[in-house]
Image (spheres, rainbow, N blue to C red):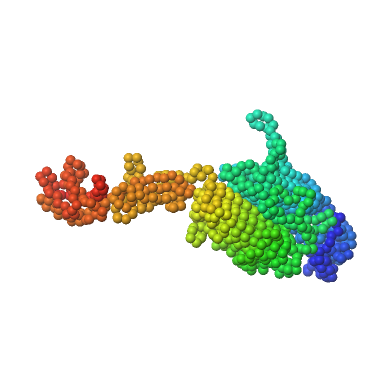
Amino acid sequence: MNTIKKNVISFVLVMALVLTSVTVMPVSGATNVTTISNLKFAKNDDGSCTITWNKLDGGSYNIYKASSRFAKYEKVGTSSDSSYNDKDYNGEYYKVSFVKDGKEYTLSNPTSYEIETFGYNTAIFEDTDNTTEVQKYIDNVYKTTEAGQFISDRYAMMFAPGTYSDNLNVNVGFYTQVAGMGISPKDTTLGNITCKAEWMKGKKYDGSVNYNALCNFWRSVENLTTTNQTTMWAVSQATSMRRMNIKGNLNLHHEGGYASGGFLADSKIAGRKYTYKDRKTGKDVVAEAGVAGGSQQQWLSRNVEMNKWDGSVWNYVFVGCEVKPLLGTNAEVKNGPDGEWPYLAYTKVTKTPEVQEKPFLTVDKNGEYRVFVPELRKDATGVSWDGDEIKGETISLDKFYVAKPGDTAAKINAEIKDGKNLILTPGIYEISEPITITNENTVVLGLGYATLKPTKGNQCMTIADVKGVKVAGVLFDAGRNKSSTLLTVGTEKNTNDNSDNPICLIDTFYRVGGADSTPGKTTNCVVINSNNVIGDNFWIWRADHGAGVAWDKNTADTGVIFNGDNITTYGLMVEHFQKYQTVWNGNGGKCYMYQSELPYDITSQSVWNAPGTYGYADYKVNSNVTSHEGYGIGIYSCYQKAQCYLKSAVECPNTANVKFTNVCTYSLVGNGGIDYAINKAGYGVYGSGNMCKVLSYVNGKAQLDKTYEKARKGIYENHIQISGDFDYDSNMQRVYTKTYTGKNITPKVVVTVDGLKLRNGVDYTVKYTNNKNIGNGKITITGINAYRESTTFTLKIRPAKAKVAKKKITKKKATLKLSKVLGATGYEVSYSTKSNFKKKNTVTKKTKKLKVTVKRTKKMPKGYIRVRAYKKVGKKYYYGKYSKKIRVK
């Protein structure tokens, strides 16, 4: 950097001494090579610097330097050797060209203290840079990252304090962090930050264009002021917008395309006024634009100051926010937008109980790099940075080990053990043992979505039960050899009180599968044993798409297990794990905004049943927990491989201090669904687009939204099938007749609504009345849970069909021996001259005997005989079916 004299951290001094003493060998076989490679920088004790590179065959070298990485490079010297010492070093960047036979070849990539320290993929911009060159670099990165959902590239774009061109537009793609480097976002101003959703553009269900942001993961922007009229930030999970000062309005979607975010914290959105013409009156109307949630399915806003919020889909949570309109005089400051559940999906919490804002890398006017750790805040509203004093701790860079991809965990752990904090520069760190944090107040700061990936079934990181550890900006990615856990915090069953200096996990993200054809595997992603931990923005994801993804490939039981007490999370998003998504075993847990999808790829119900029930609860508060609070809990089903059901989205003990506010369940597609929202409260959601909302739940009592009855579907006669023959009564209702057996008669009932076969005891009940004895009973089907209405059918129970065991017919009489019919009082015998047994031609008599004699007379010398059993109940007779007709010739 120009006008900068840097203090050199110890490891760079050592590197400088080593480099100046090494004889650089020519590149093997380099006769025709003209490209400078392996360019290195080292700062010397006397304030000069030395740059070195691989020696080329024959020729010399021109040396260029610039005040900043993207400023104009001027020639400052030549060298016949593969090194150059600059005694006038003042924080500049260097490039080298090869000259041979009078021809100068292409300039090398740059080197500098910054590149040597933070890696080539950390670009530190200055306001003296050439805007065209800066824009070119940003655009080239975006070409790589725009659609690079599972690429290995990682980038950090850091803007030193200053004012940049309003025309500068930073498009933010995958695995890209964009950040200002001042203490306040006001220190760094640029034109516009944009996250678009063009790469997955498609069609909506109605045929309109869908700028689909559902997979816009893993990107962040922080600590900047933007001057553009409208900022677009169309993102989903594993993204972060924090510590931003947005002068215009903010759109969280791309022209209404689908989106599934997201996280916004410690930021100001000024909004803007605009004028439009009223269609009816033709007059100009002044309005204001603020934050447009648009199509975002869910969102957490924490400690955000804004003029307005528009939009409501499934689950928006506002914690410690301040909303003050631009229009109107003496406008009241509110804790969120107007509107309440269930009509608008707004959960509003006035104060943030306790929060640690994310540490970040800074540089001052003297070029000193430090990490700023904001002060822990309690009962906070609004932003942390808008005042005369921004409270926090500044830590010099020489207190950090700055790691680069290729560093081993053993090397990193040695530095941490020696008392260093840790910066992980952009890239993927394949490690064969966990990074181990054992010292209090250790800061681990990832830049550019630095990624930890285990190679031997080990964990990525373990944190001892020590106070004040802060881990921020790290992606934990499961390796091909199954790990037990990716991150463990603290030791089991400890009783340490860390409330005065909690462990904090900030912008930490976890992934199982998707990036590699050889799938990642783990048993759990995160296990937190310590007490008083704060989690600020989690996405814990078992991949539902990408490479190596299937039920038996990227296996993982549980997303996160909270064993410690008094753990608080803001923005907890956990998806697709094969058992429980989230388990709370400790007391005093608080969750502000939860988003989860159940696994898509369950192969059958039988592989997905927790002990004693069906399905695995998504959010499980263990039965021994006595206190817990959840605010804005959203859980969705989208079973794509099999028809599956989950009994309860949330399982929790029924006790006075376990409380939930605003819980929703939603069924995205029609393969099964969720029966209850919490325990056995709330109605089921099935099919596509069904939602249940529970406004509150405590101690077994639930308050449901007023649209409950409208949401329930009716069960009517045409939905019901009952086994057996039936006739219709005079009202055209079905009447079922069954044979008396001496036992309860329960015909099989099948209910189907909208093509979905419903479940007895879950979706409806069946009640049988008077279904044992001969007479008339009832079958009543009543909708429950997500279904309503009741339908009753008549059930007739009658004696069995009579049978003639033996018969003897003579000229004078017919003698019949009847088989005994169970439950019958007697038998009715009919003798008719006609086979149709019309009354005028028929003689009928009753008998209680099994032997029946019918005399043949002159009037009825021949004809037909039939018999039926009967049961007399009071004065009423109930008849069975007639026997076969016997012909008397």
Q: Is residue 56 left or right of residue 199?
A: right
Q: Is residue 387 left or right of residue 354?
A: right
Q: Which is more toward the observer, 875 or 426?
A: 875
x, y percent for residue 514: 61, 59
Question: Residue drawn 51% across and 54% down?
Answer: 679
Q: Residue furthest front?
A: 656
Against 508, residue 327 (above or below) is above
Against 695, residue 400 (above or below) is below
Q: Is residue 20 left or right of residue 204?
A: right
Question: Residue drawn 78% across and 60% down?
Answer: 395
Question: Residue drawn 25% across and 47% down?
Answer: 874
Q: Residue furthest top?
A: 281
Q: From this viewpoint, is residue 670 visible?
A: no
Q: From this viewpoint, is residue 565 visible?
A: yes
Q: Which is more toward the observer, 834 or 299?
A: 299
Q: Which is more toward the observer, 622 or 543?
A: 622
| The image quarter in which residue 522 lies | bottom right
x, y percent for residue 678: 53, 53
Q: Which is more toward the observer, 361 or 417?
A: 417
x, y percent for residue 800: 26, 52
Q: How many marks?
A: 0
x, y percent for residue 58: 85, 66
Question: Residue drawn 89% across and 62% down?
Answer: 87
Q: Quadrant of the N terminus?
A: bottom right
